[in-house]
Image (cartoon, helix red, strand yellow):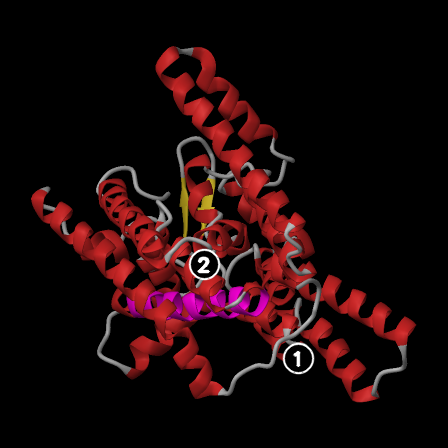
């Protein structure tokens, strides 16, 4: 199935029953990861819940939720870390949940992340089921769950929230729900800068759909109007926040780029990342890490090419390509790149299709082994360097 071909979409209750195996499997994998983290942390006299809710970006989000924007840290080297770098949807949700429940801001972030991760699993299933069928959809969700950095899906970070919005926006595109796709794309643009990938998928798919329907036969005006409205809605979230930051900083439309520069984030076409990898080959032990990075990038590109060859629909190809480009070609913290790639779930579809072709006992064994490895790695990683 290619481009925007559609299956019959089941009603709500039927869709939930259809997705139930994927959601239950996802919940089981994440529960195993949290259990491993709790046991590992206890053995090291650390608090697993603190690791999930009160370190790195989670602290920045809760500070925005509690105090608003305007906080910054000036480092000795002159860098300025401003909380304007963090998009507002997650802290807005944290503030809302804190206002209507007894939860603290950190608790609210954790709850939002848990709910969003289930929504993301549902969205990934819906997309994969639509394109490849139910069995591949279940496998796609499980493969996403057992990623080595899957523990981030349970942290008070914005990756799960963004992935949920992106997946359901892409599903809306695939099923011709243009207004819904545009609205969800707008919300994704309020969540992370990579929301541009969702906007690109909506715009390119809309333009191609318009060109095809125009060349084939006239379409009802209402359809064209909904598609146009979806295109208008899609960029509003990201554009609105970026323009607000520019106004807030007094530096105009490009003010957000200055904020990111204070964090040494930027887009340099991959030069800084390539130099980082090359520097690994200056000594023997680190050369192994450099080789691993090269193999990892090659694997990502290979999965992307395989997905294209397997006929992934245009919205997925565009979305995944932009996510890959922004993650690999940005001069951001290199240790963050694995978690920045979490939203690129269509990369996993070739693996899911291959897994779906195995007999059930064999595929279950593969998933179980991967889940244990992911849980152990996540517990070790989060108790150590963790995701910056």
Please tell me which residue is depicted at 8% across the width and 44% down the height of the picture: 43
Residue 64 x/y as whole percent:
39, 62
Instruction: Please identify the quadrant where the C terminus is shown.
Output: top left
**Farthest top residue in view:** 283
Please tell me which residue is depicted at 10% across the width and 42% down the height of the picture: 44
Residue 223 x/y as whole percent:
77, 84
Callouts 2 and 1 close, C-beta under 8 Å? no
Query: Is residue 221 in view from this perspective?
Result: yes
Circle 2 sits on which residue?
140
User: Left of 217 or right of it: where is 27?
Assistant: left
Label 1, secondary structure: give it: helix
Q: Nearer the viewer, residue 185 or 356?
A: 356
Q: Is residue 16 part of the magenta span, yes or no?
A: no
Circle 1 sits on which residue?
179
Please identify the dominant SS of the magenta region: helix
* Eye-nearest disc, 2 or 1: 2
User: Counting other residues with Cα less than 10 Å from the Cα at mark 1, is it few (<14), some (14-19), or many (20 or more)?
Assistant: many
Instruction: Please identify the quadrant where the N terminus is shown.
Output: bottom right
Residue 227 vs 307, above or below: the answer is: below
- Residue bounds of the magenta highlight: 109-131
Please tell me which residue is depicted at 15% across the width and 53% down the height of the picture: 38
Label 2, secondary structure: give it: helix
Residue 333 vs 217, above or below: the answer is: above
Residue 57 x/y as whole percent:
37, 52
């Amino acid at each position: 199935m290619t481009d925007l071909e559609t299956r019959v979409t089941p009603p709500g209750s039927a869709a939930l029953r259809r997705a139930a195996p994927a959601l239950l499997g996802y919940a089981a994998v994440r529960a195993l990861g949290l259990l491993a983290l709790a046991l590992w942390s206890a053995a090291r006299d650390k608090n697993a819940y603190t690791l999930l809710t009160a370190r790195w970006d989670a602290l920045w989000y809760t500070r925005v939720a509690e105090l608003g924007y305007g906080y910054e840290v000036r480092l000795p080297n002159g860098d300025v870390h401003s909380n304007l770098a963090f998009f507002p949807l997650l802290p807005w949700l944290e503030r809302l949940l804190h206002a209507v429940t007894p939860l603290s801001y950190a608790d609210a972030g954790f709850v939002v992340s848990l709910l969003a991760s289930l929504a993301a699993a549902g969205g990934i299933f819906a997309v994969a089921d639509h394109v490849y069928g139910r069995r591949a959809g279940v496998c796609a969700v499980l493969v996403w769950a057992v990623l080595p950095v899957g523990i981030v899906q349970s942290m008070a970070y914005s990756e799960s929230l963004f992935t949920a919005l992106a997946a359901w926006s892409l599903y809306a595109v695939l099923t011709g729900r243009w207004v819904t796709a545009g609205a969800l794309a707008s919300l994704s643009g309020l969540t992370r800068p990579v929301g541009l990938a969702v906007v690109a998928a909506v715009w390119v798919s809309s333009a191609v759909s318009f060109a095809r329907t125009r060349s084939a036969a006239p379409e009802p005006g209402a359809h064209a109007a909904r598609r146009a409205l979806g295109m208008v809605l899609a960029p509003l979230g990201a554009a609105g926040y970026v323009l607000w930051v520019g106004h807030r900083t007094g530096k105009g439309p490009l003010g957000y780029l200055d904020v990111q520069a204070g964090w040494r984030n930027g887009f340099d076409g991959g030069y800084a990342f390539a130099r980082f990898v090359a520097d690994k080959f200056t000594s023997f032990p680190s050369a192994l890490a450099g080789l691993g990075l090269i193999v990892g990038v090659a694997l990502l590109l290979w999965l992307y090419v395989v997905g294209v060859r397997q006929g992934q629909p245009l919205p997925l190809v565009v979305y995944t390509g932009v996510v890959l480009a922004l993650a690999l070609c940005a001069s951001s913290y290199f240790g963050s790149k694995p978690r920045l790639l979490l939203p690129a779930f269509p990369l996993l579809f070739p693996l899911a299709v291959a897994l779906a072709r195995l007999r059930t006992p064999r595929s279950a064994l593969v998933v179980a082994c991967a889940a244990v490895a992911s849980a152990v790695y996540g517990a070790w990683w989060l108790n150590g360097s963790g995701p910056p």
